[in-house]
Image (tube, rainbow, N blue to C red):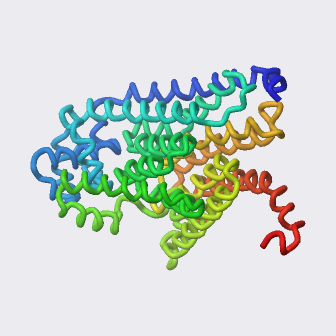
Amino acid sequence: MGNALSERPRWFAAALIAVASIVLAHYAQVWTVVPASLAPTSDFAGTYVASTLIGSGHAQQIYDPASERQTLVSSGAPATHDNIPFENPPAAAVVALPFTLLGAGAAWRAWSLLQLALMGLSLLLVTRAAPWPAGLPRLPRVAIVLVALAGFGTGLLFVEGQWDGVSVLGLASAYALWRRDRPGAAGFALGFTAAIAKPQLVIGIAAYMIGRRDWRAVGGALAGAAVTVIVGLVGAGPRAFGSFVTAIATPSNSPTAQMQGASGLFGSLLGHAPGVFLLAAGAGIAAAAVAGWLGTVAHRRPDLFEPSLCAAVALSLFASPHLLGHDLTLLAPVFVAGLAWLAGRPSERRWPGLATLGVLAAWVLLSFASLGDLSQNNVGVPGRATPWVLLLTAVVWSALVAGAARPELAGRRRLPRSAVA
């Protein structure tokens, strides 16, 4: 297989690198032309305001709308754009506290660069840990990494100054540690980073770990989340946690129809019709249950870890009650790991094989779906595109898992009942 891989035409990988480089250059160009006056209106502004309130001794007000608006306008935001609430856990504001030493514009740029650096570091960790076949040349590996980095979610993350670089680093670190047979540390990395800002994104991943019976990882995740809670308690005080629960219970700035997971799917299909929340919750629970089943498959077949994890992450994002385009970056590290696994399959001797092309197509389609959903506010069929593509992505990887496990399942069906017992 090594010779076949080494003889693959390099033009496809070179084309991927060229396109991904152009896309990344466009993200950088958009970021550089954003004027400093708009920085206080980015998504990072909510975090900056909360951190500023903590730094000035008003930690108990980080979820108070009036205090947030006053601080936001003081940071340079126009009075007509003074409603960017802080909706992350208190630990997020504590972690971002050093950035308040900078003005709002400089802090946003520094934060955006940090998130991009975390994305790059995450993909490097995964690339080093992933099961690349020995015969795959370096050029396709570089192409896969750049395509993962160039997803539309990265552009949103970079320009908006969102938190997902931290979440991506946690998942990438967990994957690398799992590959080194250190499940406790893997769970800790995942739990600690997820609890800082976006715990809702890992619901399905938690179900996957439980289904995989990875109890050391589950324990590590709980310990990591506990450390994050302690950081929030020490830095913001216990009253902030009560205010946080109230803030997320009434997400006035996160309309259901604008989400891009299960809640966004049913919200965009049915609007404010009765039962939308229950439908979304039911779909999220079902997605988490399938992620748990994938974990059981990975428990029986450790060689299917990568594709099962890819499907589980896609389902975890779909199940998230609060999902926007920048959150899709969580798929980037498992995208790299999954394609590394695929490259070693017998069916992919001539890279890129049909399965690789299908996964690449789903990744590109996800970016276009998220881009289209930015300007899609209509209610009705077919609803938001991103949740449909997330489900398609999960189906693609689940089909690869099922296909790889089929010989084993067929063999079990042929065994006599006494042998199975």
Residue 360 appears at what percent x and percent y? 69, 39
* Residue 378 can be seen, yes or no: no
Q: Residue at x 41, y 53 (%)?
A: 191
Q: Nearer the viewer, residue 24 or 335?
A: 335
Q: Residue at x 42, y 55 (%)?
A: 221
Q: Is residue 285 left or right of residue 36?
A: right
Q: Quadrant of the C terminus?
A: bottom right
Q: Nearer the viewer, residue 406 or 185?
A: 185
Q: Residue at x 69, y 58 (%)?
A: 300
Residue 31, compared with residue 153, is above or below; it is: above
Residue 82 appears at what percent x and percent y? 25, 50
Residue 22 appears at what percent x and percent y? 58, 24
Q: Quadrant of the N terminus?
A: top right
* Residue 351 can be seen, yes or no: yes
Q: Nearer the viewer, residue 159 or 52?
A: 52
Residue 395 appears at what percent x and percent y? 70, 56
Q: Is residue 49 left or right of residue 174?
A: left
